[in-house]
Amino acid sequence: MQGFALYPFDPPGDISALRADLRTWLADHQPRGDIVERANCWASFDAGFSRALGAAGYIGMTLPARYGGGERHPLERYVVIEELLAAGAPVGAHWIADRQTGPLILRYGSEEQRQRYLPGIAKGELYACIGLSEPGAGSDLAAVRTSARETAEGWRINGQKIWTTGAHLSHVILALVRTEEGSERNAGLSQLLVDLDTPGITIRPIIDMAGNHDFNEIFFDDVLVPHGALIGTRGEGWKQVTAELGLERSGPERYLSSHALLAALIDAAGSDPDPAVAALIGELTAEMWTLRQLSMSTAAKLAAGEDPMVEASVVKELGNAFEQDMPRRVQAVIDCGWDDNADLARLLRALLIASPSFSLRGGTREVIRGIIARGLGLR
Amino acid sequence: MSGARDMLCDTASAVFAEAASAGIAPVEEAGFALLLVPEADGGFGGDWGDLNAVLQIAGVAVPDLPVAPLILSGLGDVDPALHAAATVSLMAGAMGQALGLSIEHVNTRQQFGRPLGKFQAVQQSLAVMACEVRAVDAAAAAMAKRLDVVGFDAEAANFEIAAAKLRANRAVGVVTAVAHQVHGAIGFTREYELHRVTIPLMRWRGEHGNDAHWAQRLGRQVAGFGGRGLWEAMTARAD
């Protein structure tokens, strides 16, 4: 049986210099945040940091210069993302806009939409959230019911979105809505880019089990947006969303978002760790190194203009398992109490509590395995 | 893949097909001991990318023959870690074969009126197995790339060899368990060919360094880097 094709990760330019420049920049600009903040850094919202990062040219790197972008190669952006995550930088504010909303607007948006939104995204000043899930449509996205009807004045939206990370801090939502009355499943869906200050929108917090406010539910009550809010082609929403999810599932965040715990474990172990701790460090390192190869190969395939749907799902599946297992395995060998105040103990506790979400966000484990099974020719 | 490597893989496939019934002699006669020997010394002048490709095919076709030692013997006395590296490539091939046989079986075998592969529980198991196979493929390829960059110097590739052998060892448990589970009783027979790859996988897991050996060796190396140093070392070795 032929394995999956591996794509060579071959970014243009001087990658070592790019890393060195960014590391220097981070040494000057990264907030001395608490170690727990750094541990799940792509959820850490810091608008000041995002603005400074944007000004330094590290956001919107692949966008054309005429929209404020850096016209860099996607794999150069990949290297920057790796460095930000490995350093535990607070990238949560601009994360979604930079990773998926910006590229989607560039690919499917009108010229007016590009000029209106992309420069703010590249500056690290305009933040976006993902409007996919609904109370009856989580893993089964084709069950989306939120409706948008075309009227003389524009699109009139009614319905509800849920699990919307960062909606309370974002400026726009890219919502998947049903634009054809009576349509079913993945037909008749479209994407609308909606400014969150539009009248008729209500955002309510959902507090997670760790006590954090990341999630929200969003209610659309006769919300009227202009005709120009439609992104891409009417009725092609499903196809656009599927492409968008490819961007979401294979990035380095799938194995580096909790890197602070591994780093803290290594530091706590010292240069001569006991055998059980050494073995655990070795196992986690082998897994992380392998995940990095898989993620880089997938990024290279994406950069080559191909659709790495299955590969991206493999990265998400293995990356989620790695990040979910890591706190449990660390807890199994490190002697520390639940209420200890040492950095490693606090970090461990925070990630144990956060870890159930890792195999949910961006598609549940079961759905992701279903995509892989389809790729194997089983469905 | 280069044209030369395509040709090499075609040759390897043909020779290993013959060796499956005739034993190691056809592999010796075809000159595979010269694969890594420089052209100036009368060899093929291949690299570790070539070796990885050839041994993956061997892992599929002739997992019970000592192909890796034969090829490494052409280099004279080599660092034992290179045997571990070669074993990873064999394992990647054998795991791919175990996955291929499993997919073929569940798409053919019918139970309860439909192919096994249509059952979600079976699909989920095979997806888990495929992830492991893919991980070992990627680890083997990256290790081979590093060995080529450092010119076969096992010491300079010690991180990549340790990580790849350890990752491959850890995959053996999942891959052999799922492959046998989805095959049912037929996979446990002498007649059916699944054991031709699963038994070698069980053997290779303990050869040239078991999990504990590589985990501690890699772990001690990483402890020396420090927390931030791990990331810096990992990127410096690959950029």
Image (tube, coloured by chain):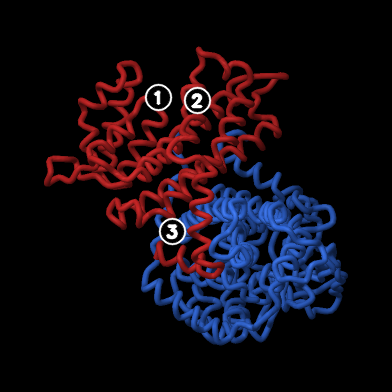
- Which residue was labeled with disc 1? B64
Classify 10 Å Cα crowding around label 2: few (below 14), some (14-19), many (20 and above): some
Pick the residue in front: A283 or A74: A283
* Pointers 1 and 2 in contact (C-beta within 8 Å): yes
Classify 10 Å Cα crowding around label 3: few (below 14), some (14-19), many (20 and above): few
Q: Where residue A353 sits: x, y (%)? A: 78, 60
Q: Is residue B233 above or below residue A66?
A: above
Location of residue B114 (image quadrant): top right
- Which residue was labeled with disc 2? B199
Marks 1 & 2 on one chain: yes
- Residue at 53% x, 67% y: name it: B226
Question: Visible in this render: residue A250?
Answer: yes
- Which residue was labeled with disc 3? A304
Q: Secondary structure at mark 3?
A: loop
Q: Is residue B75 above or below residue A225?
A: above
Q: Where residue B163 sits: x, y (%)? A: 48, 50
* Pointers 3 and 2 in contact (C-beta within 8 Å): no
Q: Amino acid at mark 1?
A: Asp
Task: Tell me the mark number nearer the camera, choosing from 1 and 3.
Answer: 1
Task: Tell me the mark number nearer the camera, choosing from 3 and 2.
Answer: 2
Q: Pick whichever of labels 1 and 2 is earlier in the sequence.
A: 1
Q: CA distance from mark 3 to mark 2?
A: 39 Å
Marks 3 & 2 on one chain: no
Q: CA distance from mark 1 to mark 2?
A: 9 Å
Question: Visible in this render: residue A188?
Answer: no
Chain shown in red: B
Classify 10 Å Cα crowding around label 1: few (below 14), some (14-19), many (20 and above): some
Q: Is residue B219 above or below residue A57?
A: above
Q: Where residue A129 sits: x, y (%)? A: 71, 70
B204 to the left or right of A232: left
